Image (cartoon, grey):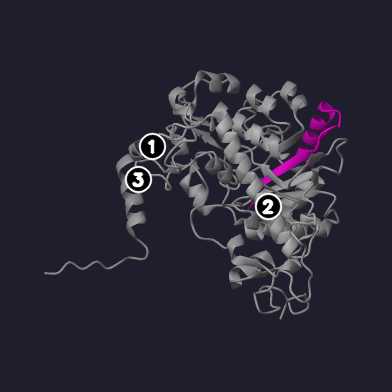
């Protein structure tokens, strides 16, 4: 008798494997990187570049400015960056010290900022980063006033796109003596970060905390507030009311470190609607332009950057793309010349180059997300910095190419009117017309674009 295979839409191979793993081991899945499910994304938007009604700029002769200033609301010393592309917070512990050093060198070379993460600030990171944003997270791991005063900006993390409402995780295999000492916790033991700050429960408490941080730093540096994208409209308004200079909104595609799979794929909203809701909140409060907006989660290319800016962001922040530029998921590490094939090490993790998300394991084959002394040597900071610098430069060139094609002499002049959507879902989420129409799904007939 012939074997029949009738596909079950509810219990496909992935779901079946998940149930079998759960039944056998009694534990839930944990992994790195962000959501893998297909959701409306910047890829679903395209630019209406210049033709008869717009005049493009000549790329070889006419400048296109990328200078970006963040934190102009209250800080005495706002952050001035050469480009609107920043590096997202990733902890020492999740990443090796050599990775943090490479990121700092690259960010400094292109004139942008990098960000600490859970676990505090390492000397390598501070020394290599000209502009360093210091995170204040719910766990307070490694957080201290001395490092706070060394920072160029402070980011109060309320939530993250990969796990809004949840805390981070760092498994015991990555808790070396050095990581443990910075966090004042035992080595080799799994660590969970708190999901909420210990000293405040709402926006009024957050306002007090922000004033404390300003007084510690003599009102010199900007205060960012980072939220995971869920109830974005109200969360952004509350962050502004609490006194934020900059609001960072992290969509569900964001995330680099270990997180429960159920959070990654089933919590939060995509970056595309998050940007629109954040801009609408700032506009309704009359602070758009006064309070800057940084967007993260799924930003990979110069086109993504340009679209985020056109939707209203002042800057973007990148995590996963940065790791990949350092060698994440490559068949060979950026080892400065040896280029040993490490496919066998991917196989030990049950994966292969291009499909790895085992950041939580501490066995990163290319030495980026590990604390193993032998593995971390596979990332040479100088070579890593060179590769990441190239990546950031390419993003910037792509960004200015699209801006010039839209007739803009400044990338911050990109606007929503420059975009249309290729799908109804993306049009509704981003608040731009469906291509070939003036229709914006979800708008009332009395609103622009509504039918």
10 Å crowding of disc 3: few (<14), some (14-19), many (20+): few
Q: Which mark is residue 341?
A: 1
Residue 323 screen position, x and y as percent: 55, 40
User: Relative to residue 87, is residue 365 drawn left or right?
Assistant: left
**Residue in front for this viewpoint, 395 or 17:** 395
Quarter placement of the C terminus: bottom right
Estimate the spatial distance between the alpha carbons at disc 3 and disc 1, rounded to whole Å: 33 Å
Residue 25 screen position, x and y as percent: 33, 40
Q: Which mark is residue 397?
A: 2
For mark 1, give the secondary structure: loop
Residue located beneath label 3 in the image: 22
**Total of numbered circles in the picture?**
3
Dot placed on the residue nearer the N-terminal end, 1 or 2: 1
Estimate the spatial distance between the alpha carbons at disc 1 and disc 2, rounded to whole Å: 31 Å
For mark 2, give the secondary structure: helix
Q: Nearer the viewer, mark 2 or mark 3?
A: 2
Dot placed on the residue nearer the N-terminal end, 3 or 1: 3
Residue 160 in view (yes/no): no
Numbered range of the magenta stretch = 204-230
Extreme residue in the left direction = 1
Residue 61 screen position, x and y as percent: 78, 57
For mark 3, give the secondary structure: helix
**Residue in front for this viewpoint, 344 or 195:** 344
Tell me what residue is drawn at x 24 percent, y 66 percent. 5
Q: For the residues labelled 1 and 2, say whether their Cβ atoms are less than 8 Å apart.
A: no
Whether residue 216 is in magenta: the answer is yes
Residue 256 screen position, x and y as percent: 54, 42
């Amino acid at each position: 008798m012939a074997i029949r295979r009738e596909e079950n839409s509810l219990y496909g191979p992935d779901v079946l494997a998940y149930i079998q793993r759960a039944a056998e081991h009694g534990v839930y899945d944990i992994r790195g990187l962000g959501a893998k499910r297909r959701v409306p994304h910047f890829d679903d938007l395209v630019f209406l570049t210049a033709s008869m009604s717009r005049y493009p700029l000549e790329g070889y002769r006419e400048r296109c400015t990328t200078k970006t200033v963040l934190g102009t609301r209250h800080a005495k010393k706002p952050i001035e960056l050469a480009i609107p592309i920043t590096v997202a917070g990733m902890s020492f512990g999740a990443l090796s010290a050599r990775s943090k050093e490479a990121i700092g060198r690259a960010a400094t070379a292109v004139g942008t900022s990098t960000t600490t993460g859970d676990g505090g600030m390492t000397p390598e990171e501070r020394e290599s980063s000209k502009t360093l944003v210091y995170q204040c997270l719910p766990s307070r791991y490694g957080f201290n006033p001395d490092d706070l005063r060394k920072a160029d900006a402070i980011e109060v993390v309320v939530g993250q796109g990969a796990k809004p409402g949840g805390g981070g995780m760092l498994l015991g295999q990555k808790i070396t003596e050095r990581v443990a000492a910075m966090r004042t916790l035992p080595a080799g033991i799994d660590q969970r970060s708190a999901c909420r700050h210990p000293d405040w429960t709402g926006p009024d408490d957050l306002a007090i905390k922000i004033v404390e941080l300003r007084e510690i730093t003599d009102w010199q540096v900007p205060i960012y507030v980072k939220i995971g994208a869920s109830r974005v409209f109200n969360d952004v308004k509350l962050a502004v009311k609490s006194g934020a200079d900059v609001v960072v909104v992290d969509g569900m595609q964001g995330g680099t470190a270990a997180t429960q799979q159920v959070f990654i794929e089933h919590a939060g909203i995509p970056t595309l609607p998050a940007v629109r809701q954040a801009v609408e909140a700032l506009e309704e409060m009359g602070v758009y332009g006064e309070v800057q907006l940084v967007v993260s989660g799924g930003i990979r290319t110069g086109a993504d950057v340009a679209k985020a800016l056109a939707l209203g962001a002042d800057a973007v922040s990148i995590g996963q793309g940065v790791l990949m530029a350092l060698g994440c998921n490559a068949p060979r590490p950026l080892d400065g010349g040896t280029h040993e094939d490490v496919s066998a090490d991917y196989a030990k993790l049950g994966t292969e180059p291009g499909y790895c998300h085992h950041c939580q394991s501490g066995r990163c084959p290319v030495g980026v997300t590990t604390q193993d002394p032998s593995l971390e040597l596979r990332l040479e900071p100088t070579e890593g910095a060179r590769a990441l610098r190239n990546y950031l430069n390419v993003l910037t060139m792509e960004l200015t190419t699209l801006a010039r094609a839209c007739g803009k002499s400044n990338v911050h002049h990109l606007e929503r009117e420059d975009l249309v959507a290729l799908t109804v879902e993306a049009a509704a989420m981003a608040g731009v017309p469906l291509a070939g129409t003036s229709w914006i799904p979800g708008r009332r007939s009395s609103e622009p674009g509504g039918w």
